[in-house]
Amino acid sequence: MVTLIAFLITIAVLVIIHEYGHYRAAVACGVKVLRFSVGFGRVLWSRQRGETEFVVCALPFGGYVKMLDEREGPVDPAERSRAFNQQKLLARAFIVAAGPLANLILAIGLYSAVNWAGVQELRPWLAQPRATSLAERAGLQAQDEVIAVKAAGESDWQSLRSMTDLQWQITRVALSGQAMDLQVRTRRPDGSEESGSRTLSLALNEIPVAEVDAKLLDRVGFSGPFMEPLVDMVVEGGPAQKGGLMAGDRILSINGRTPLDASQLLLWIRESASNGQAQALNVEVERQGQVRQLQVMPVMRDINGQRIPRIDAALGGIPSVVEVRYGVVEGVERAVQRTWEVSLLSLKMLGKMLVGQASIKNLSGPISIADYAGKSMDMGWIPYLGFLALVSVSLGVLNLLPLPVLDGGHLMYYLFEAVTGRPVPDIWLERLQRGGVAIMLAMMSLAVYNDLARLFGAH
């Protein structure tokens, strides 16, 4: 129910803002607006305000603003000057562009609100990277905190405040096919820092652009935020409890090896099976200042089609978090910068998918939007606003693409008219419209397929 409500709110807000942009621009240009519709199909609610009918329809996937237009029916000669098709070229272009621009302005407002309110995010304090991974080869170690990054060749360092910042910068640089320089410092579990920092080079250029997707951090070798090798909880009657483990135990070693953090501990347990059979684990723990020797016998369980040893215990301390908050002016500046960066990254990703350099698996549809809407709303209103801003940017950028059925397609027509001095012939408008519909249907079908593949674990 939360997912459904969050999805409907998301669609309603984005559609209303987008169409309101068209509506306000049309009114400002003196164009008569006949109908403002949220959704398509059967009318569920309507109200007449002035000369415009405002309606809500049964199918919530989109909306439209219907303006007086001679191409769509007879127009009273007294109102001919208020028809959309009679407006000057710049006015028509402004009305069409106002929808996507409204989405981008909304994103700036939402990002600003998030920046002002502040949000708790994971500190970019890293667990031990996987063996032989790019992260390990770069020299990253458990307890390293990444404080700044830049693409190789860039002069300006980008300071980081959270794991989200790190993920964003890694995606940006990997998509450009460049290596990344990192400034890191070692932070101890007690919060103290080793003096000085060091500069490392992460060879993101070795990752094919086609593999830049939601699993990018995993491909780089990051295993998550740093967490101490502690036992957080044990399942009643499970192998951990039977072996004597208790919540609060600090694991000093497992089969003679000292874990640097919880992620390494989990990896060793997962790799402890031999020939598909669980093997006993000799575990040394510290409990209330005393060292104890225990033996835990994992059980094999089916996880996503694989037989994996489990001890039925939650391992790891609480990861370190930081509150990311900005002042009024800086919050807006950051919001504008993030909106610009997300727009450019979206265009770059779409372009690379078009030429086959990026995976089409990155294309998401309504099912993914609904899923993330529900998850972000469960986390609180601030994460939800951040999600809404991201989708608003995506909608604005998508609508500016030069496809005939989108706002960008109409702007493309107006560009042709500006260059040639005459509008696109009707026969070509019809052909382009059909082609645009076919392309959009193909994209929507692919997006829904990707959604279902993610939902059922095929991706």
Image (spheres, helix red, strand yellow):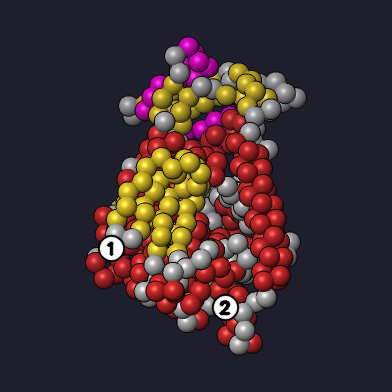
User: Residue 59: where, in percent of width, then height?
Assistant: 50, 42
Residue beneath disc 1: 326
The image quarter in which residue 231 lies: top left
Answer few, some or many: residues within 10 Å of disc 1's Cα (few below 14, many 20 plus, some between 14 and 19): some
Query: Over which residues does the magenta segment extend?
Result: 237-257
User: In the figure, 363 relative to 149: above or below?
Assistant: above
Name the residue nearer the viewer: 170 or 369. 369
In the rendered structure, find residue 414 and report the number of the disc placed on it.
Answer: 2
Total numbered labels = 2
Amino acid at pointer 2: Tyr
- Secondary-structure class at tag 1: loop
Name the residue nearer the viewer: 216 or 236. 216
Q: CA distance from mark 2 to mark 1?
A: 41 Å
- Secondary-structure class at tag 2: helix
Name the residue nearer the viewer: 215 or 360. 360
Answer left or right for 190 relative to 87.
left
Can see residue 335? no
Answer left or right for 91 relative to 303.
left
User: Residue 129: where, in percent of width, then height?
Assistant: 56, 49
Q: Comparing marks 2 and 1, which lies closer to the viewer?
A: 2
User: In the figure, 127 relative to 300: above or below?
Assistant: below
Q: Earlier in the sequence, mark 2 or mark 1?
A: 1
